[in-house]
Amino acid sequence: MTKLRLGVNIDHVATVRNARGGAWPDPLRAALLAEAAGADGITAHLREDRRHIRDADIEALMAGLTVPLNFEMAATAEMQAIALRHRPHACCIVPEKREERTTEGGLDVAGDAARLADFIAPLREAGSRVSMFIGHEPAQIEASARIGAAVVELHTGRYCDLLSEGREDEAAEELSALRRGAAHAHQLGLEVHAGHGISYDTVAALAAFPQVVELNIGHFLIGEAVFRGLGPAIEEMRRRMDAARAPLGQAGA
Ligand SMILES: CC(=O)[C@@H](O)[C@H](O)COP(=O)(O)O
Ligand SMILES: NCC(=O)COP(=O)(O)O
């Protein structure tokens, strides 16, 4: 059985660094600490506006990491050239708007399938696993499979927001839709990941989806690190993931 992997997103170490314009805290140092605490991979999103991660961070991560890098990128020519230069383990194609506070929704793969098929082909040929960051709608999942993506990452932000707002019935509906989406994607031969906004309160329900093999978690962990340290914050997330997975017989497998 496949172990549920934890990808730690270190974007918001860079957010803190950039607030003062210097070099501290260093995202690579955070990534190496995350590795030591049991992260199976590191995720970093090089936004077009460079609001957190910068080009030099990607270079440092590529040179310094021993676990795989999941490079989050918009479907632009600039980002494609950067990905082809670095050839990260994975390229996750995300929608991006400069005016958004965070990634607001999933990529419209169904509405832009021909362009995205052409866009991801060189990334695949360069050896990166291509992942589409999408919502749980069947049309988006089916289009991701059709264009040749290896992976889909389901956007869990709405579920996490609804639960933290106490809107439990709506959260339960969203969770069911995510569960159906994970099963549908798996049936189509896609590897299934999930991420965005995941916290200690929301991780168990998502880790319990048997088809999900990777969770990418960042903002909550970097915030929690202020209180308990990055290593312990990650170890507690890992413990909760394994506990949720144990009934499926997949913990530590
Ligand atoms: C795609 C995704 O979910 C993450 O990369 C997230 O977007 C990073 O944080 P920001 O949205 O704050 O840049
Ligand atoms: N792709 C989602 C991710 O990398 C982490 O998102 P968040 O936990 O920072 O919201």
Image: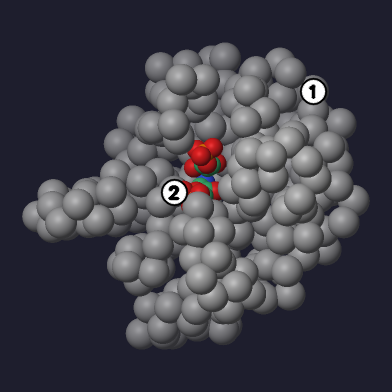
Q: Residue at x 54, y 54 (%)?
A: 218
Q: Compared to 64, does 12 lie above or below?
A: above
| Residue at 78% in and 41% down | 22
Q: Which residue is mark 1?
A: 81
Q: Mark 1 is on which residue type?
A: Ala
Question: What x and y, as percent, mark residue 117?
Answer: 59, 22
Q: The N terminus lies in which quarter of the figure?
A: bottom right
Can you see residue 177? yes
Q: Position of residue 112 (x, y in %)?
A: 47, 16
Is residue 16 depicted above or below 205 in this figure? above
Q: Is residue 94 left or right of residue 181?
A: right
Q: Point out the residue furthest to the front here.
A: 20
- Disc 2 crowd, CA 10 A, few/some/many (<14, 14-19, 20+): many
Q: 101 or 211, which lies in front? A: 101
Residue 44, quarter of the rendered image: top right
Residue drawn at point x = 60 percent, y = 59 percent: 8
Q: Are marks 1 and 2 in contact (CB under 8 Å)?
A: no
- Which residue is tagged 2? 196
Image coords of residue 205 (percent x, y): 31, 67
Give the residue at x 73% y 24%. 80
In the image: residue 126, left or right of residue 143: right
* Residue 63 x/y as whole percent: 90, 51
What residue type is disc 2 on? Answer: His
Local SS, label 1: helix
Asked if residue 173 lies left or right of residue 197, the reply is left
Colouring rule applied to residues? one colour
Calculate the distance from the C-alpha at mark 1 to the C-alpha at mark 2.
26 Å
